[in-house]
Image: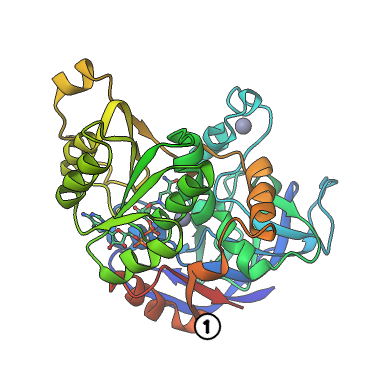
Amino acid sequence: MKTRAAVLWELGGKWEVEEVELDPPESGEVLVKLTASGLCHSDEHLVTGDLPFPLPVVGGHEGAGKVVEVGEGVTDIEVGDSVVLTFLPSCGHCSYCVRGMTNVCDLGAALMMGPQLDGTHRFHARGEDLGQMCLLGTFSEYTVVPTASVVKVDDGTALDKAALVGCGIPTGYGSAVRTAEVKAGDTVVVLGVGGIGVNAVQGARIAGARYVIAVDPVAFKRERALEFGATHVAESADAAWELVSRLTRGQMAEACIIATDVAEGSYTAPALALVGKRGRVIITAIGHPEEETITASLLDITLYEKQIRGALYGSSNAQHDVPRLLELYNAGLLKIDELITREYRLEDINQGYEDMREGRNIRGLIRY
Ligand SMILES: NC(=O)c1ccc[n+]([C@@H]2O[C@H](COP(=O)([O-])OP(=O)(O)OC[C@H]3O[C@@H](n4cnc5c(N)ncnc54)[C@H](O)[C@@H]3O)[C@@H](O)[C@H]2O)c1
Ligand SMILES: [Zn+2]
Ligand SMILES: [Zn+2]
């Protein structure tokens, strides 16, 4: 079939919206008509090269929609089902899945390769095969994805809102609640409160944190973070240090989550300085693969038992966390509507990314 998709043809290029060819679902795959797709910063990394990915690629990894066709052997998903597409597939039977760590499922090895799990491509244009970001490619009206990437949600779910539960919400919420293990009464600092960080702020609030300090150089982001549960804001990690020191009477925070646009090696020492004994620094932001040097006082790490933890998808388990987060939304505990600053047509995707870079959006959303 033909569909319209945003394709990245070259490093540093623009997203080009064009008609592309989409094959029917193969065995173990489904065809999804998307309702909406979020504009996560990770797709920007494909453009800048911070996430190396074979081009051309259909971008987008944060979406929801309805199933319109199922491939051979698909028994647990039916035509008409409402689904959230998760950027981390889980097979359910690898060593990690069976231990409840589905975010690090062995299928993750295929995420940044381009083709589908069987090594062949579903999207084609201009005589070339197109890869799919994280096996998804949600910058398209229709896409074909493996069932391992699909989470069924209740009929009647607002799929435009649910799109953000594909990446931004579980990644941010989970970075606080799961990876950082925030507990009632804790003090939590979030460095960078865009689409991911602001969800770490709300995760910390829901987990019962006493103080949540949102750090961002952009005034608009700091103002919005207060609406999501930040108790204090600061313009920089240095400014936050004075604040956290005063608030905690020198004990410092239990956790500091790095959710900046890019992770830099120079961010870890200030983040470690913001946490106290047994404090956790969580690295959620994506760093360039060649960034191999991070700053830290090794003596502080030993003497104060400080920890640095990576967070992929906020250590979430999609089949559990996606429905759970939608329940929190329905119960009025988790804000989703307020995350969506602006909506765009697929044709205006480059404007959406321009607005993200300029600090004008918490999250931009493409509505199909
Ligand atoms: N680990 C994962 O599973 C995962 C999943 C999705 C996204 N990510 C990554 O998370 C990061 C954030 O994504 P996003 O969509 O929220 O991006 P975003 O652009 O919406 O937000 C980034 C924020 O960081 C702020 N910032 C920049 N430099 C800063 C600094 N030095 N100190 C404090 N704040 C600073 C910006 O002003 C902006 O508000 C990206 O690197 C993205 O690739 C990781
Ligand atoms: Zn994302
Ligand atoms: Zn697995």
Q: Which residue is drawn at 15% across and 34% down?
A: 295
Q: How far across and down, in percent of the image, does residue 344 sit? A: 50, 81
Compared to residue 322, the image places residue 177 above or below, namely above
Q: How far across and down, in percent of the image, does residue 319 sit? A: 68, 42
Residue type, numbered disc 1? Arg
Q: How far across and down, in percent of the image, does residue 58 sit? A: 50, 64
Q: In this view, does 336 lie to the left or right of 241?
A: right
> Which of the colour schemes (rainbow, by chain, secondary structure, one colour) is used?
rainbow
Q: Residue at x 84, y 61 (%)?
A: 79
Please indicate, yes or no, whether residue 113 appears anywhere in the rendered image: no
Compared to residue 277, the image places residue 318 above or below, namely below
Q: Tell me which corner region of the image, top left, top right, bottom left or bottom right, holds residue 253.
A: top left
Q: The residue tagged with tag 1: helix, strand or loop?
A: loop
Q: Which residue is drawn at 64% across and 58% down?
A: 329
Instruction: Name the residue nearer the viewer: 238 or 81.
Output: 238
Q: Residue at x 53, y 75 (%)?
A: 366
Q: Is residue 67 left or right of residue 237?
A: right
Please indicate, yes or no, whether residue 87 appears anywhere in the rendered image: yes
Quadrant the N terminus occupies: bottom right
Q: Tell me which corner region of the image, top left, top right, bottom left or bottom right, holds residue 254.
A: top left
Residue located beneath label 1 in the image? 345
Q: How far across and down, in percent of the image, does residue 227 sit? A: 44, 64
